[in-house]
Amino acid sequence: MTAFRTVNFAKSFARPVAHTHPDAVRVGEVPTDLPIHLTIVMKPSVPIDPEGIPMSREEFAIRHAASPDAMARVEEYIQAHGLKVDEADAARHIIRISGTVKQACAAFQPEKLGMFRFAGKAEPCMAREGNLSLPASISSDIVAVMGFDERPVARAHFRRRKERAGNPQQIASAAQAAISWSPVAVAKHYGFPDDVTGAGQTIGLIELGGGFTSEQMTSYLQSLNIGRTGTLLAVSVDNSTNAPDGNPDGADGEVQLDIEVAGSVAPGANIVVYFGPNQGSGFFDALNTAVHDSTNRPSVISISWGGPENGWVAQDMDAMDQTMQAAAAMGITVTVASGDNGASDGSDQPLMVDFPASSPHALGCGGTHLPRIGAETVWNDGTSGGASGGGYSTHFDRPDWQSGNSNIGRGVPDVAGNADPESGYDVSIDGTATVIGGTSAVAPLWAALLALANQKNGNPAGFINPKLYETPSALNDITEGNNNGYQAGKGWDPVTGLGSPRGQAVVTMIRESGSDPATS
């Protein structure tokens, strides 16, 4: 008889579905004959050092692939339960399997499954509570078993400038106070290098919906007199595709904002957009695909999606973090928006941070208000208008390199940039000119800066967090404002981190840190 043990996966899933998602409505049991696709995330055979000398993807596969013996034992176990192995990739630490819910439940024994209806999902989807159980013979080799939970886990972190309300005098006054910038103007303000274009670099964008057309992106860039030489490519993950829906307030706004910011600031860099489904396993698969993409080879990855930590399954966060460790080891920087809902992150808690920005191996990007004249301040338009996400993780411990943080949890964000819609970005969404803000714009802005730095320095920036905390003078410290929970101050703070970039200083800091080139 197989010996099972309950696997908590750090904290597994401690909150009921309905409580984490107030709009969740249980609509029934999961049919046992329903097809299911799961991703099993394996541990690397040798622990990953994210702060070591960057290595190529090929070298990483040799050093840190999952153990062949462990892979074989897991495959034997799942096949014994009638499940099919669709893909086994030791270098990516994954085994993808399929079968029926009945077979999957027999193999992994989820405590509770149900069909729920969620806002944003056209059809009911499966969600789970409680732990999974695995036999002792394989449990120590596995980080996560993903796919039982199809809940939407993330939202796009952008905000369009709202139409102004009030009497004519109030509307006129508000309009006069508001400004906007092209992405290129923001980059110039921050002193990004203007003698490189990002040529030879690839920026990966992770998207969980929406889409773009090449014609619209080309038209926007031409309107800025930018002659892009980099390519633009969409990659489908888990059957999700580039599918623009014509709704500028939906996912199209996110996708096209990311492309337009990154594409105009680093016009020589190639851009690859990885489209995955909005659920834990889909988000993971999109990131994992980008990190290990040996064809397109992104050197920087930008993520503008996320959700409150208390809405995530802990094993999913651990799996995502392991993949970001892999990215760091291969010299790939991952920039992530910290959220647009201040210190609560829009959760049912007064203080909560956004994941994946809270991963210790992500560069968390917060938001500022950037005036034409005067001091840059924290982005905070009130509880309903949006504010820079920031605070302390309740899942990840404070990294050793995070100086200035006296909390036991990982502090978010690390850096910041212009994000206030009232000082937002002039972009075009689905062919219509508009002004957008949000920390969604900051992640691709930093990604573009790092692509420029990689070209200028001749080697990948990689995991820059420790370097930034050692060289805070490479950033503009933001000391005025709050995010409805924490106050900005001198040095690092859980509102705008170390501050906004001093572009050339960041490039110099990376060069002087002196990592050897990697052919990633």
Image: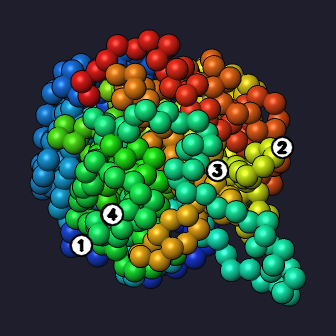
Task: Tell me the element at label 1.
Answer: loop
Answer above or below: position of 513 versus 486. Answer: above
Q: Alpha-carbon distance for marks 2 and 4?
A: 38 Å
The residue located at (81%, 38%) in the rendering is 479
Q: Alpha-carbon distance for marks 3 and 4?
A: 24 Å
Q: Amino acid at mark 3?
A: Asn
Out of 33 and 243, give the one closest to the viewer. Answer: 243
Disc 2 + disc 3, Cβ < 8 Å: no
Q: Amino acid at mark 2?
A: Glu
Answer above or below: position of 91 versus 345. Answer: above
Query: Which residue is disc 4 drawn over?
Result: 218
Query: Which residue is disc 1 drawn over?
Result: 34
Would you call the spot at circle 2 few (<14 residues within 10 Å), some (14-19), or many (20 or more)?
A: some
Query: Which residue is disc 3 drawn over?
Result: 418
User: In the rendered image, which quarter is residue 269 located in?
Assistant: top left
Q: Which of the two labelled residues, at mark 2 and mark 4, occupies the earlier sequence position?
A: 4
**Relative image position of residue 374 (x, y in whole percent):** 81, 46
In this orientation, does residue 505 appear? yes
Out of 292 and 166, give the one closest to the viewer. Answer: 166
User: In the rendered image, which quarter is residue 332 located in?
Assistant: top left
Q: Which numbered disc, 4 or 1, marks the residue closer to the eye?
A: 4
Q: Which of the two labelled residues, at mark 3 and mark 1, occupies the earlier sequence position?
A: 1
Task: Tell me the element at label 4.
Answer: helix
Disc 2 + disc 1, Cβ < 8 Å: no
Query: Which residue is disc 2 drawn over?
Result: 480
**Relative image position of residue 461 (x, y in whole percent):** 42, 26
